[in-house]
Amino acid sequence: MALIFHTPNTSNARSGNWLALPALPAGTDPMREVVLSCSAPFHAGVCTKDQATDDAGFFFFDAGRNSLGVVDYTKITVRQVSTTSATMFVHSYSISDEGPEGN
């Protein structure tokens, strides 16, 4: 299984800029099952990296573990909903693999 536990991502405050997820290893297919885990509510979407404006679609996610399903990993951007930053944990796996089991 090509499960990748990415370097933790410090997601910035709601008023801050959109951040990209940690980079994939070179040659990795960007179409992946993506799971984000955070202790605080956050936004995830396809807004422009390093911009503060909501210039594309995004969704609100509550704290905890959230699966985005199969997405283009390289286009995902995130930011916190609240005024404080939080550490976000990211893991992803190839669409041809079964994901991890259990809670």
Image (cartoon, rainbow, N blue to C red):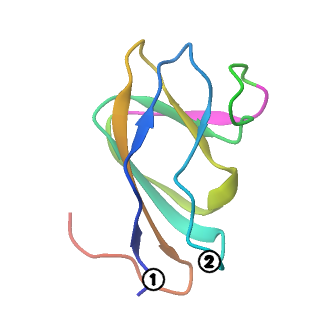
Could you say where residue 101 lies in the image, as x and y percent from the top left? 26, 76
Can you say whether 30 is above or below 42 in the image?
A: below
User: How many badges with numbers are in the image?
Assistant: 2
Q: Amino acid at mark 2?
A: Thr
Q: Indicate which disc residue 28 carries.
A: 2
Residue shown at 66% from the left, 79% from the top: 27
Percent of width and height locating residue 79: 52, 30
Q: Which residue is mark 1?
A: 2
- 53 is higher (above) or lower (below) than 102: above
Mark 2 vs 1, N-terminal side: 1
Q: What segment carries the magenta color?
A: 55-62
> How far apart are the two marked residues, 2 and 1, measured between alpha carbons?
10 Å
- Which residue of the protein is positioned furthest toward the right in this rendering? 55
Q: Are marks 2 and 1 in contact (CB under 8 Å)?
A: yes
Q: Secondary structure at mark 2?
A: loop
User: Which quadrant of the view contains residue 15?
Assistant: top right
Crowding at dot 1, Cα within 10 Å, few <14 / some 14-19 / many 20+, comes out as some
Q: Is residue 53 left or right of residue 70?
A: right
Q: Position of residue 42 (x, y in %)?
A: 45, 31
Q: Position of residue 33 (x, y in %)?
A: 52, 67
Instruction: Please tell me in which quadrant of the rendered image residue 74 appears.
Output: bottom right
